[in-house]
Amino acid sequence: MLNTGAMAQINPSMLSADFARLADEAKAVQGADWLHVDVMDNHFVPNLTLGVPVVEALGRATDTPLDCHLMIEDPDRWAPAYVDAGAGSVTFHVEAAAAPVRLAREIRAKGARASMALRPATPIEPYEDLLPELDMLLVMTVEPGFGGQAFLDVMLPKIRRTRRLIERHGLSLWLQVDGGVSAETIERCAEAGADVFVAGSAVYGAEDPAAAVSALRELAERAAPPHATSR
Ligand code: DX5
Ligand code: ZN
């Protein structure tokens, strides 16, 4: 179940978990709002991870909803299968999508939350009119492809501008950040207006991953401006 009491949602990235023990690794972060599952196809990004069968199996092994981040070419063709596999939220990259509006509508029609991701060099402004079609917008804070990279501070203005657009249009979509999010960087993201935080190495690299989730949530909630409502 979604932790609706939380203003800041923390989504541990399974990319930093032990792939041979995914069910146990999901249990190790019981208090997490979502499990972030990074799907990479070796084309959109230079790395290869997992696909539909693993998402299906993971979904059967945990009650925590799955937040699937598709770093793949041709999401128009492949994304709907992740909803069928049990994902509660499916994120596609706008740089890879041929018809983002059609795809977001298809994801929603199938019953999942529709989310769109922007690589660091992709601006938000051309997509302002698409925001009502989305349940979440993901601003990447590293180049997608690998865990454990350094947070890109230069993305903070884009997070701020995206938050302003969401407010200007009176929308309730969530604003997610992914890449280099840790105890050192999460407050800056929250201050800038993010309300959903993906953390891979900062959670699974910690001695107690569940405690790391709580600590990150506390930092984000304390730093969040009053408008923040990720529910
Ligand atoms: C990177 C992935 C991230 C990654 C984050 O392309 O999308 O979800 O796992 O890992 P950290 O938190 O270690 O930067
Ligand atoms: Zn991700």
Image (cartoon, rainbow, N blue to C red):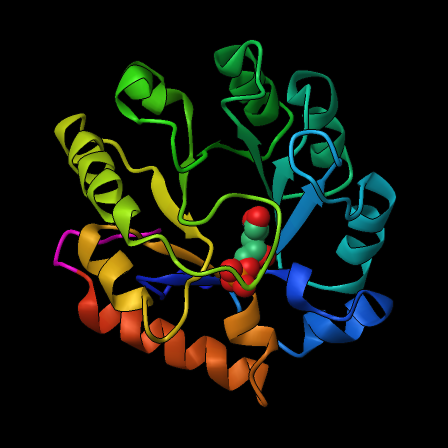
First to last magenta residue range: 225-231
Taking the image as drawn, is residue 2 in sight?
Answer: no
Residue depicted at 77% across the width and 71% down the height: 18
209 vs 85: above or below: below
The answer to whether one can see residue 130 in this image is: yes
Whether the magenta-drawn stretch holds residue 36 is answered as no
Query: Residue at the location (25% across, 38% down)?
Result: 158
Q: Is residue 29 left or right of residue 121?
A: right
User: Residue 146: percent from the left, percent from the top?
Assistant: 61, 53
Residue 107 vertical position relative to residue 27 in the rendered view, above or below? above
Residue 45 image-quadrant placement:
top right
99 vs 202: above or below = above
Front-lying residue, 47 or 30: 47
The one nearer the camera, 171 or 130, is 130
In the depicted structure, whether residue 66 falls above or below residue 158: below
Count of numbered marks: 0
Chief secondary structure of the magenta span? Answer: loop
Residue 161 as seen in the image, left or right of residue 202: left
Q: Position of residue 152 (x, y in %)?
A: 35, 52
x, y percent for residue 76: 66, 17
Q: Is residue 227 magenta-colored?
A: yes
Give x and y (percent) for residue 83. Answer: 69, 34
- What residue lies at 61% left-to-right and 46% top-to-bottom? 145
Residue that lies at the very extreme toward the bottom in this rendered image: 207
Q: Quadrant of ligand 1?
A: bottom right
